[in-house]
Image (tube, helix red, strand yellow):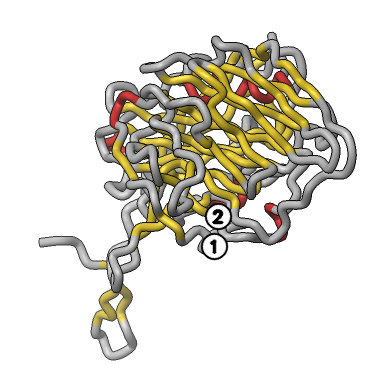
Amino acid sequence: MPFLFGSCSPDGAWDVVSAPPTPKTSYRIPVTFDRIAQSTSLTNFPVLVRLEAGTFPYKLCRADGLDVRFRADDGTTALAFEREKWEAAGRSDFWVKLPSLAASPATTKIWIYFGDGDSVDESKASAVWTNGYLAVLHGNYSIDPSTLTKTFIDATGANNPALPGLYSAPADLGASSPVGNSGFIFGNTIKDGIKFPAAPALDDLGPFTFETWMRDGGSVAGSIIFNQGPDFNLSVLGAGSLRFQVGYSATALQCDSPATYFATGGWDQLALSWDGASGVAMYSNGTAVAATVTGPSGTRTSDAATDLIIGNIAAPPIQSAPKADFDEIRISNVVRSPDWIAAQHLSQLGTNLDFGPRETIAP
């Protein structure tokens, strides 16, 4: 029989109490980011930490993954993170905000802690996506139990639940996507898109940065990647190229990418940053491309109180949506530096991330 613990009362009876709880064993693994930050250090930088069944000991975690948490190099300072996806014995994705990502050749180390059965869930997406992010769409979605309506989740929380317009079916891209399983498939090129209802934070953006992964399936010229009214948009210019436009009273700002900006059939990480004047930079897979910029002149045309739309939802359509798959769509109200864009590309690929040996933490 199990041992009983207690004390003897004055009348000789035993006051039986429960046995002391079994101490919990927890573990930690060091994670090192190497050669990601290029020539400058980056502040409040979100990185992707992917846990694979072949390299991460899922059997030592809680089944729901709520014990997984992240600490700075000192092993004590908690790091903000978002658990985008948890698959016990599968592939799990976490976005972790690093207060500082060191410039090359220095490295940045953090710790993954797990295995404490009593740990509290520390995941908080909105704490990760600060530093200028207005919207971050991983492709995951919520479902209204009464209407079964699916709504894409904005990880920043800034424009959520103000993201009710679901026009593009959520998709499981599987292992084909470099970033994660969830994503967006724009298959109906006539009317397919996602709508952010008008919000002051999205009005007259500039400075502005747009980032996404795109797998083109043969989009025709004029297909809209995003638009906020007729005078603020990114569209397909031709095979392999895009055009960014901002309306002005005299001459519009227009930035055209080279014809090698993206390839049909494969995934490309595309980004553009605009300083709110005439400065525009375009990036393909982390590298700046030679874009052609003309204008602007006059007064900028306001897009206030206008929905920001990824793709096209007009009926009847004025312009079509792209025939493409998308993943990891991000909108910011700051200019991202070349080092930031390059580091995001490497981080999301996970090629510059190393896991060290597991350490046991005594109960």
Q: Name the amino acid, label 2.
A: Phe
Residue 322, percent across and down? 44, 33
Residue 361, percent across and down? 45, 36
Q: Which of marks 1 and 2 is in front?
A: 2
- Image marks 1 and 2: residues in contact by CB distance under 8 Å: yes
User: Is 113 on the left-hand or right-hand side of 103?
Assistant: left
Residue placed farthest to the bottom in the image? Answer: 11
Q: Quadrant of residue 290?
A: top right
Q: Name the amino acid, label 1.
A: Ala
147 shown above or below 219: below
User: Is 259 on the left-hand or right-hand side of 215?
Assistant: right
The residue positioned 44% from the left and 52% from the top of the image is 316
The quadrant of the image that shows the N terminus is: bottom left
- SS for callout 2: strand
Check disc 1 and report the residue beneath it: 162
Residue 79, percent across and down? 60, 42
Other-residue count near label 1 (Cα within 10 Å), few / some / many at <14 / 14–19 / ≥20: some
101 shown above or below 82: above
Q: Quadrant of residue 196?
A: bottom right
Q: Residue 196 carries which label?
A: 2
Residue 297, percent across and down? 88, 34
- SS for callout 1: loop
Residue placed farthest to the left in the image? Answer: 1
The residue positioned 52% from the left and 19% from the top of the image is 238
Residue 338 visible in the current orientation = yes
The quadrant of the image that shows the C terminus is: top left
